[in-house]
Amino acid sequence: MARRGFAFEADPKQEWQLATRILDSFPYGTPVFGYPFFDESIYHDYGVPVNEPLGVGEISRSGKFLIPSTNSTNLTVHSWFRAQPVHTRWEDQPRPADPRKTYVAFLISDGDNIGYVEGSLRTRHFDDPARGSIPMGISISPWLQVYAPQMYGYYVHALSPNDVLVSGPSGAGYVYPTEDPDLDRYLQTTRRLIRLAGLHSVWILDNGYATSPPAVTVERYVEALHPAAIFADYGGYFVPNPPPVSFQGGVPVVHAMWGDAIPPGGEDPVAATVRRVRLAAETFPGRPAFVLVALNTWTMGYSQAKAVMQRLGPSYEVVRPDHFAGLLKGAYPIRP
């Protein structure tokens, strides 16, 4: 009401044509608040919102982007405060890598949701007694710096020396970039907002999680944003993935493996993640090996990541995502 926004609710099973017509009636670049989701048995059994890729895909196809705001409160009040440019740490200078090691980096998602950041990111992760004892990357939307700058400032100042922030997904607003016909304008907005939020890298989710972003999409991100690093993917794939590490214009592009059981709840998530990290290390093309783990933000966090590393043993070394990028630059001094 305060922002004069248009609100609608449509059943994605029975009224999908109505939802499509509404989305298509608004101009490209219009932000969509809320969340495209409905309760069904898989979500109740496993906590997996299987309809999210369909909804985000439809929003992306219509040239819009999603600012998930489920359970968010008082954004009218929070956004009253003026956003000021912020600096966050990022140290990715090239550093020597030990060929006997497997380097592991962890990412925690902000739930793709401002409402999650208002509550669960703090209670599930920032209040975890293990936070600070293990390196971690945390994704956060640069829109939080616009709609709740005081809250964004809290997270920036609460970071431990072992924490860094990553912009995502997939920049300024949740979008599958390959499906977005207005991607150039979206990337222009992303560039402006990640500078405002002091973010250096971006996490891309694409194609409804089914496939990684293609090289042409990654190239557009590099050209538009000049990021320090690009991280890609979240949970599982239906088709073979690209190489785990590549470079685009000198920028490290790292594809993540899933940090949980498949499906969630099917087995011990720590054991499942340990097994997957070992397999990724064994099949990595070269030495040292590099493994990026995208933790399921609903079931895995600092304590679980610490347990994973304890089981992996001394030949595996966990590092912050920015240090991970620096090690990649040191291991691959000649980069396309």
Image: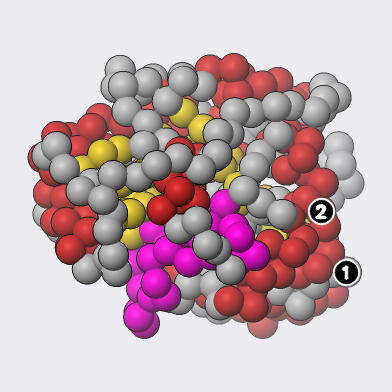
Q: Secondary structure at mark 2?
A: helix
Q: Nearer the viewer, mark 2 or mark 1?
A: 2
Judged left or right of residue 84, residue 41 is: left
**61 relative to 130 in the view: left or right:** right
| Rendered view: 48 above or below 228 | below
Residue 308 position by quadrant:
top left
Residue 65, given in percent of the width and then of the height, sits at: 71, 61
Mark found first going from the N terminus, 2 or 1 = 1
The residue shown at (55%, 34%) is 91
| Residue at point 16%, 43% (across, down) | 315
Is residue 60 visible in the rendered image? The answer is no
Q: How many residues crowd mark 2 within 10 Å: few (<14), some (14–19), many (20+)?
A: some
User: Are dots 2 and 1 in contact, CB under 8 Å?
Assistant: no
Q: Quadrant of residue 266?
A: bottom left
> What span is in magenta?
229-256
**Residue for point 66% across, 70% down:** 219
**Quadrant of the rendered image containing residue 307:** top left
Would you name the residue on which mark 1 appears? 27
Could you tell whether 61 is left or right of 272 in the image?
A: right
Residue at 26 percent of width and 39 percent of height = 317
